[in-house]
Amino acid sequence: SSMCIGVFSRDFLEKNTMRVREGISVGEDTDFLFRCILKCEKIYITQCNLFLYRYNEDSVTRNLSKKNILDLLTVCDERINDILSNKPADIDEKKALAFFAEKFIHFGIKLNRLPKEDKDELIQFIRKRKHITCYSNSIPDKVFCVLIHVLGVRFSCFVFDTIVKMRNSLRGG
């Protein structure tokens, strides 16, 4: 969902008043690209590698804050609502819902890494939208969906974040 994966004509962007939303620090590229895809009449796909991703330890997605997580969770929520209310004909609804649900889950569990005072608002946000977690297709995310409905957001996020940290340390990352 990087900005680098799409090239759009200026006419298209102006005609559809497509702009990157201001004030969003994480998820703005996903938000912009999905809104463009919904408006595109034609999409061309190439198999060429046209850019190189540089891993930046100081990037905003590596150094999460309450605002960053909330921005991304909000984008996922809005795009899922778009999909459910508009039923775009040319988009695989299940895959699109799963894509945003997985982002929602994977960033949501990171709230555990924040100070307690920052967690509470995010937990409330996720609690009100926990139905989003059920759109994911991966088995771990389906387990998370069940846990979140049975044991609650706070405990489920703690458990899954701990598992992710353990997995990453075993992988050396």
Image: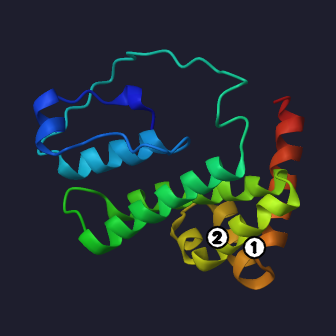
Q: Nearer the viewer, residue 21 or 167?
A: 21
Is 95 located above or below residue 47 in the figure? below
Residue at screen point 49% across, 45% down = 23
Drawn side of residue 116 relative to residue 143, left or right: right
Quarter of the N terminus within the rendering: top left
Instruction: Kindly check if marks 2 and 1 are in contact, taking CB atoms under 8 A apart as contact.
Output: yes
Label 1 secondary element? helix
Query: Which amino acid does the dot numbered 2 rest on?
Result: Ile
Mark 1 lies on residue: 153
Mark identifier at residue 14: none
The percent position of residue 156, horizontal first and vertical second, equals 79, 69
Question: Label 2: few (<14), some or many (≥20) within 10 Å?
Answer: many
Drawn side of residue 93 relative to residue 104, left or right: left
The percent position of residue 107, horizontal first and vertical second, equals 65, 52
The percent position of residue 79, horizontal first and vertical second, equals 40, 60
Label 2 secondary element? helix
Q: Earlier in the sequence, mark 2 or mark 1?
A: 2
Residue at screen point 27% across, 56% down = 91
| Residue ranking furthest to the bottom | 150
Residue at screen point 69% across, 74% down = 124
Q: Nearer the viewer, residue 31 or 145?
A: 31
Is 60 located above or below residue 77 in the figure? above
Quarter-wise, where is residue 6 in the image? top left
Quarter-wise, where is residue 45 in the image? top left
Query: Which amino acid does the dot numbered 1 rest on?
Result: Val
- How far apart in space, not on screen, are marks 2 and 1 (Cα)? 7 Å
Mark identifier at residue 126: 2
Residue at screen point 85% across, 45% down = 165
Q: Nearer the viewer, residue 122 or 97?
A: 122
Drawn side of residue 139 relative to residue 8, left or right: right
The percent position of residue 118, horizontal first and vertical second, equals 78, 59
Question: Label 1: few (<14), some or many (≥20) within 10 Å?
Answer: many
